[in-house]
Amino acid sequence: MDFEFTPHQKQLRSEVQAFIADHMTAALKAELKDDARGSGPEGEVFFAKIMARGWTAVSWPKEYGGQGGSPMDQFIIEEEFQRVGYKRIGGGGTGAPAILASGTEEQKRHFVPATIKGEISFSQGYSEPGCGTDLAGIQCRAIRTGDTYVINGQKIYTTSAHACTHIFLMVRTDPQSKRQAGLSILLVPIDTPGITVRPLWTIQNEPRAPTLTTYGEPRTNEVFLDNVVVPVSCLLGQEGDGWAVARRGLNLDRVGAWRYLISVMRDEDIVNWLKEDGDRNATLRADPRVRDKVAELWIEGQVARLMTMRSMSISQRGEAFSYEGAAEKVWAPEHGVRATEAISQILGPSAQLLNGSPDALDDGLFAHNLLGAFQSTVNHGSVQVMRDQVARNGLGMPRAGR
Amino acid sequence: MDVLLTDDERAVQQAAAEFLATEATPVLVRQAERAPDRMSHELWAKVAELGWLGISLPEQYGGQNLPLSYLGLVFEELGRRTAPVPMLGTMVVAQILARHGSPAQLALLEQVIKGDLILTYAVQEPDTRWSLDAVELAGRMDGEHLVLSGQKAFVDNIHTAGKCLVVFRMSDGSGLGLALIEPTLPGIDATDLITTAADAEAMLRFTDVRVPAADRVGTPGQARAIALEMMDLAAAFTTAMMVGAAGEATHRAVEYAKQRNAFGQPIGSFQAIQHMAADMTIGVDGAQLLVREAISRMGLGLPARVEVAQAKAFANEKCLMAVRMSQQIHGGIGFIAEFDQQLWYRRVAAWSLRCGTTPEHRALVAESLLDRQGPVRLGYDQSLQDDAMRAARVRS
Ligand SMILES: Cc1cc2nc3c(=O)[nH]c(=O)nc-3n(C[C@H](O)[C@H](O)[C@H](O)COP(=O)(O)OP(=O)(O)OC[C@H]3O[C@@H](n4cnc5c(N)ncnc54)[C@H](O)[C@@H]3O)c2cc1C
């Protein structure tokens, strides 16, 4: 067991920090306020410099535009950039990891390098009005006719469908099939005729959540697919094997730097807020009840950090996860919720004030967190289903009714 | 950074696990609970014979000098089997002697490693606080002797220990002191306590106890730092035992739930039971990661007071939760003395109250967060004013 970063890892972290200090201009910060992915003019310049340093797609294979480095290096780089509210650096997400795992050579060459450069991006088209947690209920259909698929159906919560180039679509290719069998993954250009994207505004949209809010997504989408025709070359992996294809691209997406940060940044926020000058801060800082609660949250945050490091250690060794990712996906989001709620009780009525309100604390950050923290207990595998996985995969407990 | 066990660590852990699974059976644990010394001398001899006592002690005294994290793993396994041996006090004091002992005190390590000398420590007093501020046992020099008067509480294995490391306060205002004393000295009266762990703990009364000055440990200027180190070792190893015990209680609950039926199926197939098992696993894993980090930092000589406090504060709640949920999953039988499950519950209940309660340890964490200058960040070094002062002293 080694709980210390190596000299190389420490060095990398300080290089990234120095880079950010040098290149994160006020203009870029202003741009990121509206768009954490940084696709404006300042963002493009910044991103080009990051590419030049070799800090994108660090752990992806060199032959497809990655750096062939370690997942821990990638984590360190992602953590530093995401801590200042810059999200474009993310090396996980939908698309490329699954394509690397299941794609043809041609698909890997076509998609992966372009994903790294940001020329191609995927939204995730899994959830439907009738199913989310249990994707075996997917009804969106793709019927093969000759060299094409004809797609009909509806997706919901397709975040960034309005800003992506492709949708990573889970469909039923065998209309007779039930549950997971008969599902497939199609990589569909979002501008294909027959696709309509409609916004679903979230409770974090009005007013806009400040940078570094937990979750902080102003918008997601509904996607309607109406006789959408795509070539069969859009298929990723084998037809009917979509469930396995999706899972192969998933494991590290659940954990990693972003999930870690949205779960623990609140612990740092409250401590740092309490340490600011001001009578209110000083009074609360001296209150034994506040001190006990803040320490409790901090320790929980440390557990989230260590569970993340455990997942990273497993990934770095190339070992298989049994239940560790699921355990982290229960602990970290639920900790985020406990912290957010407890902090608002410490801060009192000011913590309900949103961005732009008189007397709002830190641009309403704490209030916006209250609107977003619970969301990460639902998505990417709800905490209920993650507990099922700990029990079944980790502890070998039987399924109900068997 | 790789928080998983190395092959060598795993090998040591497995060897300890296998040895204790065969030797430290519930039958033996129950016998020890009724034995006059509340320990198994037979198991202690085997532990010594196999070299477990020297695992992280210097080679020149017969030890293996492996990093402290190995000893931490052994404590997890001892907890897993609730092994009735006086390992905690012996290892805590032996570590202190190895780091700060006089040549005569260092020489004792040979006997310790052979299993011929049990050690214990005395920090807390009847006011029960886990804090050096609470130390009132009074020491004064009288020629070549130190004279101690006052009380100590919650001292383990005082009847079997050959030496006890005592923390006291000098009456002349010169601060704290430490001495390695013989528990049989005239003027020491022990009153046995009756604990939920059914082990050997006692209150001690010191009436003008005369201790040879040579038995003091460290210089007077070092006493506070050494005492803190001793308390951290004790809290960390206790936490490691709690992690092992709560892990085993979780395992037993899961296995029980797989074969106990209700409503036509194993209770382990009910989601309510599965989610309890998941929460038990997550809580114990969290405590394990925290304590492993704390112990490995101590082994590397890095500041670790906050890390120890984090681990103990968390384990007190989560390990107790895990053993209590294990009782719950066992239904009525968990409450019955004849059934083994309760052995784990009673011990974790006691251990969660020793070496610092959750509010006490959280107060220390709060101090490191709120009473130091500058912003905080998770994963960055955290220290206390004390550590900084200590470091400054060492430098100057
Ligand atoms: C802002 C936002 C962004 C999103 N982005 C995307 C995206 O980009 N792409 C995408 O495909 N989806 C996305 N989602 C959808 C998200 O993945 C789903 O909301 C999630 O999977 C839950 O599905 P559901 O909403 O249908 O709830 P349901 O599946 O109906 O679940 C409702 C409740 O039932 C519980 N439940 C379900 N099954 C069980 C069980 N077996 N045992 C116990 N409890 C159970 C769940 O835990 C939950 O609490 C997004 C959602 C939101 C809100």
Image (cartoon, coloured by chain):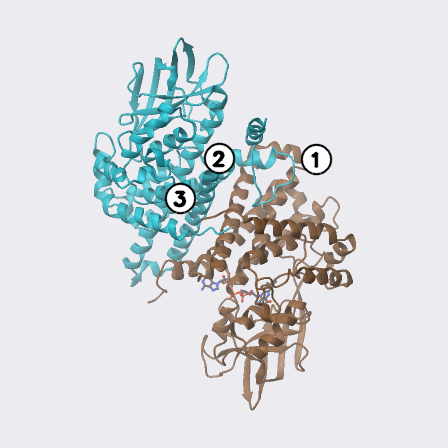
Residues indicated by labels 2 and 1 sit on the same polypeptide chain: no
Q: Which residue bears the numbered disc 3? A: B319
Are there few (<14), some (14-19), or many (20+) residues within 10 Å of tag 3?
many
Q: Is residue A350 above or below residue A218?
A: above
- Secondary structure found at label 2: helix
Dot 1 amino acid type: Asp
Give percent across and percent down for residue B179: 39, 21
Toward which corner of the image does residue A117 lie, by quadrant?
bottom right
| Chain containing the residue with disc 2 | B
- Say whether mark 2 is within 8 Å of ligand 1: no
Question: What is the CA distance from the residue labelled 2 to the residue labelled 3?
Answer: 16 Å
Dot 3 amino acid type: Cys
Q: Which residue bears the numbered disc 2? A: B361
Give percent across and percent down for residue B44: 25, 36
Give percent across and percent down for residue B145: 38, 12
Q: Residue B111: give its label.
A: none
Residue extending furthest toward the front: B60
Q: Which chain is cyan?
A: B
Question: What is the CA distance from the residue labelled 1 to the residue labelled 3?
Answer: 38 Å
- Residue shown at 63% from the left, 71% from the top: A113
- Secondary structure found at label 1: loop
Q: Which residue bears the numbered disc 1? A: A277
Q: Which chain is brown?
A: A
The reply to whether residue A238 is in sight is yes
Question: What is the CA distance from the residue labelled 2 to the residue labelled 1?
Answer: 26 Å
